[in-house]
Image (cartoon, rainbow, N blue to C red):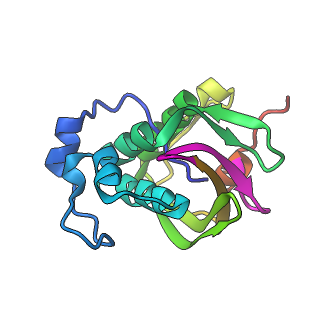
């Protein structure tokens, strides 16, 4: 999922600015240090694909702080993460919390994008997550307990996500296709979602 997990990582904009790197795909000299939202405004990002691309690129410049900053900046206040049937899985706060859990439990957790395109009103992004499971993965809030660190490198299957964008904000992300959503994220760890 564009699983961009957030939480109370103790990251603030000053810290983010001190650690970030330039965005290399940008055709101007604008740097992320000025803040991701400022970047969009100054570069008049007009396409929905540009919003999602900038969100993803900003998120992975210097994790975990950049992941948290990008989620706060680009996700709408009423953001929803949806399963493939359109059911709400997480609101913005829960999504940010889940992102925080992932970047805390997996060293070098990152998203490797393979495709990004617009289809009608939607932006479709494909790729996979990967990271080394070096910290305990606490899923107690979901009723699944704590998964102890295994030390294993996990490469998740290729997945696609459908984003809906309004203005310069992402209002939803939806699992797109077969190997997407929370079930697909947890499966490589041997975890299944609790029954409703």
Q: Is residue 42 left or right of residue 108?
A: left
User: Which stretch did the figure color magenta?
Assistant: 166-181
- Say above or below: 125 vs 74: below
Check if residue 182 falls in the magenta segment.
no
Residue drawn at (28%, 73%) of the image: 27
Is residue 120 or residue 6 the one in the foreground?
120
User: Residue 131 in the image: x percent, y percent?
Assistant: 46, 59
The residue at 70%/49% (across/down) is 174
Q: Residue at x 74, y 61 (%)?
A: 179
Q: Quadrant of residue 31?
A: bottom left
Q: Is residue 169 magenta?
A: yes
Image quadrant holding the C terminus, namely: top right
From this viewpoint, is residue 39 visible?
yes
Residue 136 shows in the view:
no
Q: In x, y percent, where is residue 170?
A: 55, 45
- The answer to whether residue 67 is left or right of residue 111 is left
Q: Would you say 15 lies left or right of 58 here? A: left
- 106, above or below 98, in the image: below
Taking depth in this image into account, of 172 and 130 the one nearest to the observer is: 172
List x then y, in percent, for residue 156.
60, 63
From this viewpoint, which residue is outermost toward the left? 18
Residue at 67% in and 63% down: 160
């Amino acid at each position: 999922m564009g699983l961009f997990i957030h939480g109370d990582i103790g990251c603030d904009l000053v810290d983010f600015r001190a650690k970030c790197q330039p965005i290399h795909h940008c055709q101007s000299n604008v740097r992320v240090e000025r803040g991701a939202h400022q970047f969009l405004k100054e570069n008049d990002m007009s396409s929905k694909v540009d919003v999602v691309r900038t969100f993803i690129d900003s998120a992975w410049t210097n994790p975990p702080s950049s992941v948290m900053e990008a989620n706060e900046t680009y996700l709408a206040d009423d953001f929803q993460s949806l399963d493939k049937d359109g059911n709400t899985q997480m609101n913005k706060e829960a999504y940010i919390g889940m992102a925080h859990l992932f970047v805390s439990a997996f060293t070098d957790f990152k998203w490797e994008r393979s495709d990004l395109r617009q289809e009608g009103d939607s932006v479709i992004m494909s790729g996979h997550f990967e990271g080394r499971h070096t910290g305990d993965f606490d899923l107690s809030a979901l009723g699944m307990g704590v998964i102890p660190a295994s030390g294993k490198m996990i490469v998740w299957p290729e997945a696609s996500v459908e984003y809906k964008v309004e203005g310069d904000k992402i209002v939803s992300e939806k699992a797109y296709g077969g190997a997407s959503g929370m079930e697909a994220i947890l499966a490589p760890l041997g975890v299944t979602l609790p029954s409703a």
